[in-house]
Image: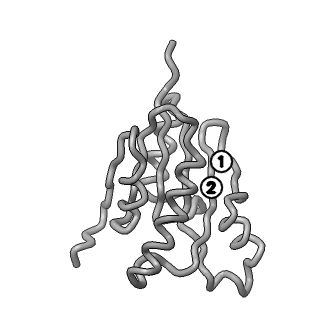
Amino acid sequence: MHSQSHLVIASKSPWDPPIRREHALAKLASRHGHPVTFVGRPLDARSLRGERRAWVNGLTGRARGAHSPGIGLIERSTVLPAHVNRVAETVDGRLLRRVLSDSLDGSPATIVATLPWQWRAVGALEGHRRVLDVADDWSR
């Protein structure tokens, strides 16, 4: 039997509570034998007040865990939310690309961006199926 394709989701939400569409997709893929990596919405510098350790761990890529045997979780950090301005988008994109690259094992994967500003990071990862899945109308 061949190994199942890896699914990596760059989510617009944290894992908890797992109530959004991308959570359901992760669970469904995992139930069908696909390894899943769920990359949650990043903490930003506003988190330095109460969640300093979590922010630093997310910035360094050490914030990893698992929801279940088939779903790995990555909590990440950024300086400013990517939607604030072009500089914030560039910085966050580079941080996201690093986290995504580190989560891949070298075999082809399907990588899903759930926000328009994540696309630059996801689109730069060649050799993988890249999907832009934005359920919200971001043109408004």
Quarter-of-image position of residue 126: top left
What SS does tag 1 mark?
strand
Amino acid type of the residue tagged 2 in the rendering: Ile
Left or right: where does residue 50 sit relative to residue 6?
Answer: right
Dividing the image into 4 quarters, which one contains the C terminus? bottom left
Task: Name the disc covering residue 74, or none.
Answer: 2
Quarter-of-image position of residue 50: bottom right
Using the image, determine if residue 77 lies above or below residue 68: below
- According to the image, label 1 marks what residue? 67
Residue 40 at x, y percent in the picture: 55, 61
Q: Which is more N-terminal, label 1 or label 2?
A: 1
Residue 30 at x, y percent in the picture: 53, 36
Residue at image location 44% in from the left, 72% down from the top: 90
Residue 107 at x, y percent in the picture: 50, 31
Left or right: where does residue 32 sit relative to residue 115?
Answer: right
Observer-nearest of 38 and 124? 124
